[in-house]
Image (cartoon, rainbow, N blue to C red):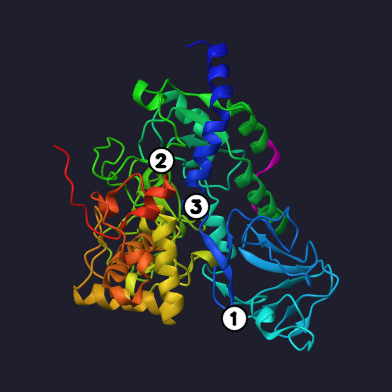
Amino acid sequence: MSAVEDDLVLADRAKTVMDMFDLAGAAVRPVVARLVRVAGGEALEVTEGDLIIKLGRSKDIPVPYRLACARLSSFHCELHLTPATLQVDIVDTSSNGTFVNGLRIEKGKKVTLQSGDSVSLVNPSATGVEAEERKHLEFLFQRLKAVSKEEQMIEELTCGICRQLFYKACTVLPCLHVFCGHCISQSAKHNSQCPECRGDVYEIRPTHKINNVVDQLLLKRPDLKRPDDEIAECDTLNNIPPTGKVVKKRPREEDDYDYGEEEEEEGEDDSDDEPLPALAPHAFRFAPHFFGAHSLPPTNCAQCTVAAVDGYLCPPGAIHVRCFSCKTPFAERPLCGVPQRCELCRTPFCDLYLGGCKNPAGVGYLQPIKDHTMDALPARLFNGNSIEQSILSSYLATAGITVPAAWKECVEKFSAGAWSPEFAGAPASSSSVICKPCCQRVFSGLLYHLRRSVPRDALPDTVTNRPNCWYGKECRTQYKNIPHAQNYNHACPQEKRKE
């Protein structure tokens, strides 16, 4: 295919690709929080893709954020989401006021909402408002995803190849994994497979939304910005144009696929509904022969000249590794009795071995599973199926179960041998020493069992009346086709087998 033909293909596919991102959007942008109506009814959801949500009675406001009440302004108030932290603020833009916890907030000023806050679009104490009408304009703010800690955001915005913040991030299609533009440019020169999942890559496209989030983070953390000379080098290595790049031609059956077309009925066979491949915990960057997990050539560390507490002194030419968090080199000693690497991804950390990491974010990063803490549901829970994520989140909120409490139950069941993460290379016990990202994957595997243990009468009929998908939790369609995810239950084991 010529360069001109490539450009034509990209231009023709632009809308289709964006539609595909919309289908996958819920999988990577789950519900962060919602306003629950005191009177009952549909909640107003805030997802990770919503930067500003307007509430009011204007016809320009989409349902369900359009509220039919003459006492409201056309544009009554706004909900603002900060992508870098998932903080939700409310801004009053009305004539009659917006009230948080019974107090009128200052017009035009942001007020941060906390889980449990009451939000009223009319004065709660006004006598002229009918009680029934007031109930429909009063809400409780409920957070479903915790405000991200800065360290967590840095980890999520780190390229799996260079292990630095994304620079001119690009998404590979069709798997939607993200890398720096220059990193994926160099990778694509030698291999047309995704560095993370090893799936075939057909196109590479710039990802502007992620770049915007990185820019916001750098405003708060300028120390994370790359040096000017490194940026210049990255620009030189980046060969992805603004319109994207075709890596190779799609197979005919995939080339003709309409991403907006609804999935066929469950009884029909679908080659796209194959079980998910078993992935390495962090795939590319943590494979033993790649980047973060490899051994360094002979180098010097503190123990090359001064003996360690246990009397160890590095011999000449000793093999060293570098701490993922603080980059400190130290001798690789697999038989020393102190964990130096994550048991799953094999990434080295110095915290336990050296008795503390120079980077505060690295303290406690590597520890036994049972000692880790969790304050938010994993982003890749249920393989990114936002429908199943929402069902579990709603159940936990309704039952009054916090995420830390859910994690505690999962660890107890794992320790007792009742539940296990069930993925390739999964840890054998809750005493296994792993890093935080790997623990997120373990948590996802255990939450599957928690969801399966929920009594049917504790879930709404719209959930329990759905038939099981034959491919169950291994279904590949669930995270890219929302109607399919809504119509079938995927919190179940795979039943169908390929002939």
Task: Write the residue at 36% across / 65% down.
Answer: 463
Which amino acid does the dot numbered 1 rest on? Gly
Residue placed under numbered mark 3 in the picture = 26
- Looking at the image, do the residues carrying marks 1 and 2 touch, with CB atoms under 8 Å apart? no
In what element is the residue under mark 1? loop
Which amino acid does the dot numbered 2 rest on? Glu
In what element is the residue under mark 3? helix
Q: Is residue 6 visible?
A: yes
| N-terminal label among 1 and 2 | 1
Task: Write the residue at 77% across / 84% down.
Answer: 103
> For residue 116, which numbered disc appears in the image?
1
Residue nearest the observer in this picture, 113 or 303: 113
Give how far across and how far down residue 308 sits, in percent. 39, 66
| N-terminal label among 3 and 2 | 3
Location of residue 36 with respect to 24 vertically, above or below: below
Residue nearest the observer in this picture, 290 or 32: 32
| N-terminal label among 3 and 1 | 3
Task: Write the residue at 24% across / 59% down.
Answer: 422
Residue placed under numbered mark 2 in the picture = 262
